[in-house]
């Protein structure tokens, strides 16, 4: 093997490794979005308060082994209103470890529960 081929293989492997590490952050965001939407629908169905909704979201994340961020801000709108859309938004930072340095991605997941017709 020549040096040029070795460099190409090293660059290819580095790109694949970084892609897999960043993909895990986006898979987690998709999981969280699904959890937020599910719990928003449950809150609408059972008439939960904001505090109950937040507790249910954290319990659901623990139950499904989702990467629970240490620091997150969660906002809930539409609770208690029959004709309003319940919207749950979560903002957090997801650390991506690239072996030599760590990148913190600012992520946002959201879930909606629309009222019945």
Image (spheres, rainbow, N blue to C red):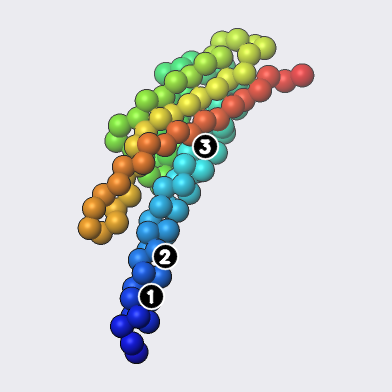
Question: x, y percentage for residue 38?
Answer: 57, 33
The alpha-carbon separation of the residues under discs 1 and 3 comes to 37 Å
| Whether residue 4 is visible | yes
The alpha-carbon separation of the residues under discs 1 and 2 comes to 12 Å
The correct choice, above or below, for 92 with respect to 79 in the image is: below
Q: Which residue is mark 1?
A: 8
Which numbered disc, 1 or 3, marks the residue closer to the eye?
1
Q: Which residue is mark 2?
A: 16
The correct choice, above or below, for 77 with respect to 4 in the image is: above
Toward which corner of the image does residue 74 lie, by quadrant?
A: top left
The correct choice, above or below, for 20 with respect to 59 in the image is: below
In the picture as drawn, the residue positioned furthest to the right comes out as: 117
Question: x, y percentage for residue 48?
Answer: 52, 18
Which residue is found at the position 41% from the left and 47% from the top?
25
The alpha-carbon separation of the residues under discs 2 and 3 comes to 26 Å
Q: Which residue is mark 3?
A: 33
Q: Going by the image, does 75 lie left or right of 87? A: left
- Residue nearest the observer in this picture, 81 or 93: 93
Which residue is found at the position 41% from the left and 52% from the top?
22
Badge 1 marks a residue whose secondary structure is helix
């Amino acid at each position: 093997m020549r040096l040029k081929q070795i460099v190409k293989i090293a660059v290819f492997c580095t790109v694949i490794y970084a892609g897999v590490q960043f993909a895990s952050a986006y898979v987690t965001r998709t999981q969280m979005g699904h959890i937020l939407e599910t719990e928003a629908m449950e809150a609408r169905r059972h008439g939960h308060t904001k505090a109950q909704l937040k507790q249910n979201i954290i319990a659901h994340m623990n139950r499904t082994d989702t990467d629970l961020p240490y620091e997150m801000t969660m906002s809930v709108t539409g609770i208690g209103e029959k004709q309003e859309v319940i919207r749950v938004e979560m903002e957090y930072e997801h650390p991506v470890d690239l072996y030599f340095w760590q990148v913190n991605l600012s992520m946002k997941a959201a879930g909606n529960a629309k009222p019945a017709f």
